[in-house]
Image (cartoon, rainbow, N blue to C red):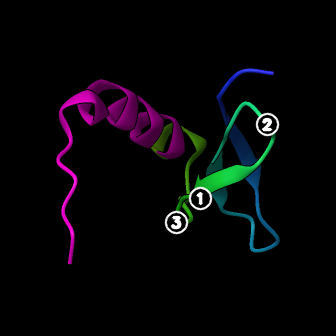
Amino acid sequence: MAYKFEVYKDKAGEFRFRFRASNGEIMFGSEGYKAKASAMNAIESIKKNSPDADVVEE
């Protein structure tokens, strides 16, 4: 099993996504989006912009 994004509709009817690790563990989930296209755009943004993301300790 590889890393993957899963898009689904929640109980409120909004689209959300979660990111699963190769071991099946959910690493993070999204907020709700009214349109599936908005959730898909958020995934594409993460895929495009995350390689350069900084790690900040607070």
What kind of residue is marked 1? Gly
- Residue 56, placed above or below residue 51: below
Graded by Cα atoms within 10 Å as few (under 14), some (14 to 19) or many (20 or more), the crowding at tag 1 reads some
Q: Earlier in the sequence, mark 2 or mark 1?
A: 2
Kind of residue indicated by mark 2 = Asn
Main secondary structure of the magenta stretch: helix
Mark 3 is on which residue type? Glu
Q: Position of residue 19 (x, y in %)?
A: 62, 44
Residue labelled with disc 3: 31
Distance from disc 2 to disc 3, alpha carbons, whole Å, reads 23 Å
Identity of the residue drawn at 21% across and 69% down? 57
Residue bearing mark 1: 29
Q: Which residues are magenta?
A: 39-58
Q: CA distance from mark 3 to mark 1?
A: 7 Å
**Measured from the top left, where is residue 24 in percent x and y?**
81, 41
Foreground tag (2 vs 3)? 2
Instruction: Farthest residue to the top: give it.
Output: 2
Nearer the observer: mark 2 or 1; the answer is 2
Quadrant of res 28: bottom right
Mark number displayed over residue 4:
none
**Helix, strand or loop under label 2:** loop
Q: Quadrant of the N terminus?
A: top right
Q: Position of residue 38 (x, y in %)?
A: 46, 44
**Is 16 one of the magenta-colored residues?**
no
Q: Which residue is mark 2?
A: 23
For marks 2 and 1, give the CA distance.
16 Å
Judged from the image, the secondary structure of the residue bearing numbered disc 1 is strand
